[in-house]
Image (cartoon, rainbow, N blue to C red):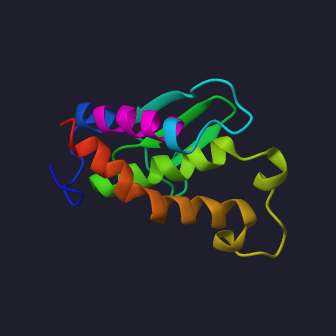
Amino acid sequence: MELTDKIKRKREALLIAVDTTQWCAAHIGYGRKKYLPELFVERWNSTDYDKGETGYYSDYELHIAYDKVGTVEGLIRTIIHEWTHYTQTHNKVRYAEGVDYREQVCEVEAFKNEEALYPACWANIITKI
C-alpha cells in the first residue's frame, strides 16, 4: 500500500483510521479530553455536507468521509486535522468574523499538524499492514 493509493473500501479505510487515531492519541494527546473519541468512518451523501468537507469532530466523536478523502494520505491527514480540533480548547475553536478559513487560529494549528505529522504516522502504520 502507498500513500497515493485510492481508498476504495470502507474496511481498508477503517483499518488505517483506527491505527491513525491510536497514533494521534500517543503523539498528539487528548488535550483536556479524557477519552478516545468514537470513530465513525462513513460514506457521505454529497448533499449532506459541504463539497470540500472530508471530516468533522464533536465533543467525543470523529466523523471521517472515507469516500471523500481520496487517498491513504488524505485519510491520514484528515484524521490528524480533526484530531487536532478534538484536542483544542473551545476558545481556540471559535471562528473570528472576517478572517479567512485557513487563517483561523484553530485551522492554522490543524493544518500545521496535518502537514508535519502525517509522514511519521504513515511510517508507523506501514509497519503494521
* Residue 68 visible in this rendered orientation of the protein: no
Drawn side of residue 96 relative to residue 88, left or right? right
Vertical relation: 100 (above or below) 35: below
Question: Residue 71 or 122: which is nearer the viewer?
Answer: 122
Residue placed at 65% from the left, 67% from the top?
Answer: 108
Instruction: Please state the horizontal and vertical placement of residue 21, each as a whole percent of the image.
Output: 45, 36
Residue placed at 31% from the left, 38% from the top?
Answer: 16
* Residue 3 visible in this rendered orientation of the protein: yes
Question: Residue 128 or 50: which is nearer the viewer?
Answer: 128
Instruction: Please state the horizontal and vertical placement of residue 112, each as a whole percent of the image.
Output: 56, 65
Queried whether the magenta region covers residue 21, the answer comes back as: yes
Question: Residue 70 or 50: which is nearer the viewer?
Answer: 70
Drawn side of residue 71 relative to residue 69, left or right? left
Query: Quick one: which residue is furthest to the left in this view?
Result: 1
Q: Quadrant of residue 17?
A: top left
Queried whether the magenta region covers residue 96, the answer comes back as: no
Instruction: Please state the horizontal and vertical placement of residue 123, each as a whole percent of the image.
Output: 28, 50
Instruction: Please state the horizontal and vertical placement of residue 101, each as a whole percent of the image.
Output: 67, 69
Residue placed at 22% from the left, 38% from the top?
Answer: 9
Drawn side of residue 72 relative to residue 23, left or right? left
Vertical relation: 53 (above or below) 55: below
Vertical relation: 24 (above or below) 60: below
The magenta region covers 15-25
Residue placed at 51% from the left, 43% from the top?
Answer: 27
Q: How many marks?
A: 0
Vertical relation: 75 (above or below) 23: below
Report the quarter where the C terminus lies. top left
Magenta segment main secondary structure: helix
Question: Residue 64 or 44: which is nearer the viewer?
Answer: 64
